[in-house]
Amino acid sequence: MQMDEHTFRRHLRVTWAQFDFLLQKLKQHIQKVHVGGRPEVPLHQKLAMFLWYIGNQNSFRELSDKFNVSQSTAHHVILEILCILCSQTSSFISWPKEFEKATSAAAFARICGINDIMGAIDGCHIKIQRPIIRGGDYLNRKGFYSVLLQGIVNEKGKFEDIFVGPPGRVHDARMLRSSTFYSTWEEKMGEYQLLGDSAYCGNAYPFVMTPKRDNGALSAEEEARNLQISRGRVIVEQTFGRMKCRWRRVRDLQNTWLDIVVMIIASACILHNLCADPTDVCEQHPLGCPRRGDENE
């Protein structure tokens, strides 16, 4: 806890100010129950352990060695912070108000030249090991086992809505129909639309603007429109890339129960929103963080 700002951020992926903000959030919900035995792990150490865990792919043995606690304590701390953070999802990821929609629409008009666009939608694979029950459902078309994350982001690359947990075999369009957002899209969208890829083509998704399929006979106007949509839609792909690059645990969630997988992914989205800064440049990938070849096309 004596590190300078640059070193602290490099190790824990957050600034000191962001760390203090999370610490205050946790203090409001942490249950202080100590019935003897070894001293309770300080809250700031719990948070540092959690950020290290979700920002890296180290094992619990390595985590316990680094923070000088037992493996069982490390398990307990990570689960405790996961549960608290996920219970506060609405504080970090929420649907925009009307004036925020208008602000996003103006920004997207500048970015891609299309009016009345308030966000972009896409799906993302999160790699897992084959589940014991109905494992075949999680084998995706890329040839690995995964769960899906559906994200709707604004022009700044911040999540406005997430839906986590469908098996990797599920198509993006079906995932959208299964999401809580779909049942209330008319109320939430109003006069605005989202940008999406060709997976969302069809009359069931009038609120998603998609490119026309290139059958070799597109007009110059249609090709230009497709390019505009792609220019705006790339924001959601970049968001997934930045999230996976900063919170590296979600690159590959092996040896983890599915309910915990869902909480880890949701927590990564929460932390992404906390740290999201469109001007922030990744030291390792100044041209944009890769998604490691997991695109859901």
Image (cartoon, rainbow, N blue to C red):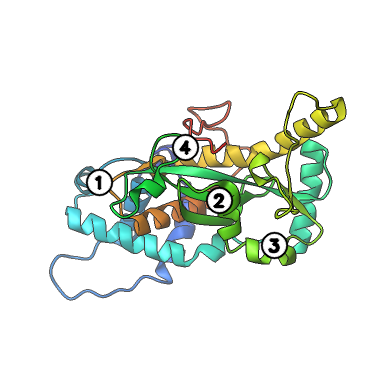
In this orientation, which residue lies closer to the viewer: 63 or 19? 63
Quadrant containing the C terminus is top right
Which of labels 2 and 1 is toward the front? 2
Does residue 211 appear in the picture of this structure?
Answer: yes
- Amino acid under disc 3: Trp
For image coordinates 28% across by 41% down, the residue present is 58
Q: Nearer the viewer, residue 286 or 289?
A: 289
- Determine whether the residue tagged by mark 2 lies in a helix, strand or loop: strand
Could you tell which of marks 2 and 1 lies nearer the N-terminus? 1
Residue designated by label 3:
185
Which residue is disc 1 drawn over?
Answer: 63
Mark 2 touches mark 3? (CB < 8 Å): no
- Answer with mark 4 or mark 2, whichever residue precedes in sequence: 4
The amino acid at mark 1 is Leu
Which marked residue is nearer to the observer: mark 3 or mark 4? 4
What residue sits right under mark 4 in the picture?
Answer: 141
- Of callouts 4 and 1, the N-terminal one: 1
| SS for callout 4 | loop
Whether residue 83 sits left or right of residue 171 in the image: it is left
Residue 150 is tagged as 2
- Distance between mark 2 and mark 1 Cα atoms: 30 Å
Measure how far apart labels 4 and 2 are at the Cα level.
17 Å
Q: Nearer the viewer, mark 1 or mark 3?
A: 3
For the residues marked 1 and 3, what is the alpha-carbon distance in whole angstroms? 42 Å
